[in-house]
Amino acid sequence: MNVLTALVAFVFAALGASLGTEGIFRPAELLPGALLSLVASGALYAAARAPRAATVVAIGCEAAACALGYLPTPLLLAPLIGCLYRLTVVSSPRAAAWWTGIAVSAVILGATAGDVTPTRGALLLGTVGVALWLLPAVFAGRMTQAQRAYLRMAQARAADAERNRDDEVRRRLSEERLRIARDLHDVVAHHLTVANAQAGTAAHLLAKRPDQARELLTGLSTSTSAALRELKATVGLLRAPGDEPADTTPAPGLEQLPDLVEAGRAAGLEVSVVSDGTPRRLPPLVGLTAFRIVQEALTNVTKHAVRPNVTISLAYDEDSFSARVVNTSARPAPAGPGGYGLIGMRERAKAVGGTVQAGDDGPGRYAVSLTIPLAPWQEDQAPR
């Protein structure tokens, strides 16, 4: 492409060197003008790699040709026009303006110096005409530069938007993975922990108290069945569209707390529930959060406490709900490192604007406290 452009520019320049007009004649010899045009066209060929050096050579050739008496027509100046265009495309506006001023001044000086007896037509052609031929190349170069900058900006925006979409997909996948992991831990782990405690207690009582061991084994069947149901419901979230629907049982809330307490008692816990305020139905997400956090607290008691005695306190205020699970153990065993129960409780509470605090509550006591503000949920449920 560069070769073709340089060849076309040479043909135009050689043709321009042969032109004359009434009252303004070209030199008799065509060869000097053709040689200068050839050098200027060669500079245009190299302008893609070295635009400034090529422009200097083209300015010198065109100024020399005009000084020899050749007419500064757009045909003769074609190589210089091409060099200025390419220089403007890769240069700053200020640099392009400087180079354009140098080119116009040099060619005008050459044209005026080469015309010993200037006529009015020759003077206009060698001054105003030169500016008219060279300035459009600079304007075209600036437009091309602006267009390329716009394309680069559009490509950068598209790439940034693509990265943002990928980041959003990864974030949502991560959140969904954490949510499913939290559900598996809070739900299935609870039932399996209770079942493990029931199985251990039944094995201990089998020889001495077979009737009580039989009752514990019956409760063990109930706990494992509940674990299977919860696992089926959670795995149903992973089904692909078009698969059979998962279990559509409503999400649990504090209405299921008596069942949870009975399951804990069957596992050997001493559990009592006290309420402060007027019990009422909580918003579904708040009720689910409270139920899961109490469930996880009981799971931790089953795993880590010895002969535990648990008190669950529920407080219904006008604009908040609180739950407190206090475990009294004769010899409390410390929870092992690396557990995810407390992390899951805090995540659940934060999702509904609440807070969870867990820690020692005196000698041989451990407490988990949950507080959820109800004002935002009441505003959402208010009629509009």
Image (cartoon, rainbow, N blue to C red):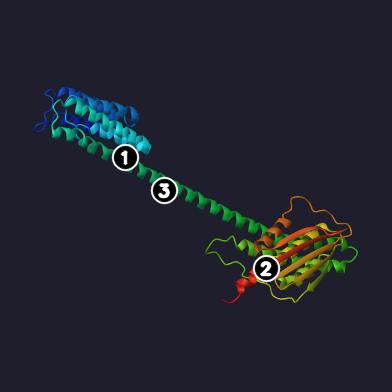
Amino acid type for the residue under numbered disc 2? Val
Q: Which of 317 and 239 lies nearest the eye of the viewer?
A: 317
Q: Residues within 10 Å of mark 1 (few under 14, many from 20)?
A: many
Q: Residue at x 72, y 59 (%)?
A: 189
Q: Mark number for residue 324?
A: none
Q: Residue at x 77, y 70 (%)?
A: 314
Q: Residue at x 74, y 64 (%)?
A: 370
Q: Which of 246 and 291 lies nearest the eye of the viewer?
A: 291
Give the quadrant of residue 16. top left
Residue ID for mark 1: 141
Q: Which of 76 and 201 lies nearest the eye of the viewer?
A: 76
Q: Quadrant of the C terminus?
A: bottom right
Left or right position of 245 against 231: left
Q: Are marks 3 and 1 in contact (CB under 8 Å)?
A: no
Residue ID for mark 3: 154
Please state the horizontal and vertical placement of residue 177, each as a whole percent of the image.
62, 56
Amino acid type for the residue under numbered disc 3? Ala
Label 3, label 2: how far apart the Cα atoms are? 45 Å
Q: Residues within 10 Å of mark 2 (few under 14, many from 20)?
A: many
In the current view of this chain or complex, which residue is farthest to the left? Answer: 22
Q: Which of 24 and 241 lies nearest the eye of the viewer?
A: 24
Please state the horizontal and vertical placement of residue 105, each as a whole percent of the image.
27, 31
Residue ID for mark 2: 286
Label 3: element kind: helix
Q: Residues within 10 Å of mark 3 (few under 14, many from 20)?
A: few
Left or right position of 327 against 186: right
Task: Judge depth for marks 3 and 2 and give the one in front.
Answer: 3
Q: Are marks 1 and 2 in contact (CB under 8 Å)?
A: no
